[in-house]
Image (tube, coloured by chain):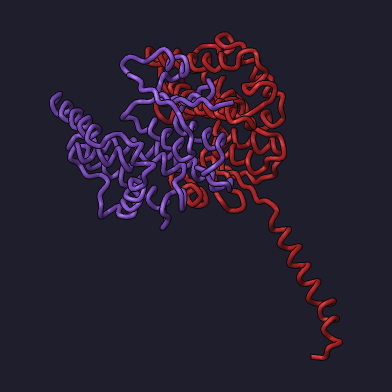
Chain colours: A purple, B red
């Protein structure tokens, strides 16, 4: 039976980007559907009635939601170019760090990005603590997944690109190049991969979005 | 060396020594499983249930969360939280990750996750929903009062009803067999009496099908032996309320 694979996403979303990258690594053809989050389609609401969010992966009519869960589904369905390690302990570690990226690292990074002057130092301290913990996991590896891009690398694309672009647009430096040179080596490696580059949103468009947000935040004070 | 001595040396010394070393190696290959836990933690209970389902012998270590052990801090330096599953010296943190690990290592007995990738994705989705919604909303029920508590109750019951809807008429969340979502949710049953008493409501009245599911789960030894008594949990919650000045 011919595979029918569709992805519901939003151009600037790191979460739909994760899904696109995972599918590309596996060499899976798919149809991409851009959603308007201000006016969600009836299909999106049908396929993700609980959270009503993108991304949604539709595989032969069956919806899978939550980007990290989608990646695990993709990895279990299409076995070439594994995204998770084979060893159960290493798999557990990969899941742990992917969760850490979403639940600890990114919230603290965003907080530091958008913090008011008075709160910035504390927010920065917290963000740096999390980045230090995360960076240690690279341990001289090319990627978090080892020689090849894996689940944690795909999850942390939010750091490598989104935080990267945002901090430049907003005019803060959380991902300090001297302090986090190991992480920056990884960022350069990751963003240098064609499979990643081709699936990122246009840098200028994303930067303009953050600049607008930053100006609006200043204006509302 | 005298040639005739060599076979004797082999027979009497080398071979037994090698066999003994091989045997010792086999012995030390036996799994060493330790669980760092805290008795009222629903997250810890998940791991207890999974280990019991698989019939794995392990050492249970109770942690004092006001005075965390050096072992806990070493095994979970990132979050410094329980539960921590330690298998042959290697830690696995986060309860749902630990349950999946247990299922993958001891895969020949009592599967916890389904084998079909789509069913697995669904199971993970609902376990993730439980993780994000039940603990937090339940906590708000016992931590607040007045208007805030009414809101918290509405939210908590809403989440339970969502799960009840997903259960439908099935015996368990995965269908006929007890599985991942059941393991993720059933520990919160030990907190139901505390939520109900603090919030003055009845979960049975709001979600009768869910309570029927609870009873089915509690018939399993793995669940019954892993959950503490609800009244004991309620006493613990009362102590917490006193400690945080919530009356």
Task: Please tell me in which quadrant of the rendered image residue A212 appears.
Answer: top left
**How far across and down, in percent of the image, does residue B52 sit?**
68, 36
Residue, x 57% and y 8% (percent of image)? Answer: B205
| Image location (x, y in percent) of residue B196 | 53, 16
Does residue B247 appear to the left or right of B51 in the view shown?
Answer: left
Where the N terminus of chain A falls, by quadrant?
A: top right
Instruction: Please provide percent x and percent y for residue A34.
Output: 36, 23
Task: Identify the residue at horizontal 67%, vertical 26% (top origin).
Answer: B178
Residue at 25% across / 55% down in the picture? A178
Q: Going by the picture, which residue comes out furthest to the bottom?
A: B2
**Image quarter in which the C terminus of chain A is found:** top left
Vertical relation: B185 (above or below) A45 = below
Q: Identify the residue shown where x is 33% and y is 45%.
A: A191
Residue A218 makes an appearance in the image? yes
Measured as percent of width and height from the top left, residue B189 is found at: 59, 23
User: Which of the two residues, A53 or A76, is positioned nearer the viewer here?
Assistant: A76
Q: Find residue B145 and report its image quarter.
A: top left
- Residue B93 appears left or right of A134: right
| Near-viewer residue (A69 or A100) | A69
């Amino acid at each position: 039976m011919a595979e029918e694979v569709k992805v519901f996403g939003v151009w600037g979303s790191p979460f739909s980007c994760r899904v696109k990258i995972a599918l590309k690594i596996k060499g899976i053809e798919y149809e991409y559907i851009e959603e308007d989050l201000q006016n969600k389609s009836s299909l999106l609401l049908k396929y993700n009635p609980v959270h009503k969010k993108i991304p949604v992966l539709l595989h032969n009519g069956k919806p899978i939601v939550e980007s990290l869960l989608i990646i695990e589904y993709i990895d279990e369905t299409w076995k070439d170019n594994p995204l998770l390690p084979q060893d159960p302990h290493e798999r557990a570690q990969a899941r742990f760090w992917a969760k850490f990226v979403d639940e600890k690292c990114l919230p603290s990074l965003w907080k530091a990005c958008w913090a008011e002057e008075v709160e910035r130092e504390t927010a920065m301290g917290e963000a740096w603590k999390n980045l230090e913990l995360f960076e240690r996991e690279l341990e001289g590896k090319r990627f978090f997944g080892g020689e090849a891009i894996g689940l944690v690398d795909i999850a942390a694309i939010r750091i490598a690109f989104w935080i990267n672009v945002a901090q430049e647009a907003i005019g803060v430096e959380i991902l300090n190049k001297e302090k986090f040179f190991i992480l920056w080596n990884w960022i350069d490696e990751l963003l240098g991969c064609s499979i990643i580059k081709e699936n990122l949103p246009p840098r200028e468009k994303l930067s303009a979005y953050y600049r607008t947000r930053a100006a609006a935040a200043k204006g509302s004070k | 060396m005298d040639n005739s001595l060599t076979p004797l040396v082999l027979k009497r010394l080398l071979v037994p020594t090698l066999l003994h070393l091989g045997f010792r190696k086999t012995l030390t290959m036996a799994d060493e499983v330790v669980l760092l836990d805290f008795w009222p933690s629903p997250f810890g209970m998940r791991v207890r249930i999974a280990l019991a389902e698989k019939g794995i012998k392990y050492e249970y270590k109770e942690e004092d969360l006001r005075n965390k052990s050096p072992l806990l801090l070493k095994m979970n330096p990132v979050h410094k939280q329980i539960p921590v599953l330690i298998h042959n010296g290697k830690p696995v943190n986060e309860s749902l990750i630990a349950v999946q690990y247990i299922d993958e290592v001891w895969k020949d007995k009592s599967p916890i996750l389904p084998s079909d990738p789509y069913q697995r994705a669904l199971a993970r989705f609902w376990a993730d929903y439980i993780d994000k919604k039940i603990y937090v909303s339940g906590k708000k029920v016992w931590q607040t009062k007045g208007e805030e508590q009414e809101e918290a109750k509405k939210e908590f019951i809403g989440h339970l009803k969502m799960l009840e809807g997903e259960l439908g008429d099935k015996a368990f969340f995965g269908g006929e067999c007890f599985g991942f979502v059941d393991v993720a949710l059933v520990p919160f049953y030990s907190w139901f009496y505390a939520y109900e008493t603090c919030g003055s409501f009845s979960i049975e009245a709001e979600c009768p099908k869910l309570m029927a599911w609870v009873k089915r789960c509690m018939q399993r030894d793995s669940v019954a032996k892993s959950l503490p008594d609800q009244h004991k949990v309620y006493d613990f919650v009362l102590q917490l309320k006193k400690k945080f000045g919530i009356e």
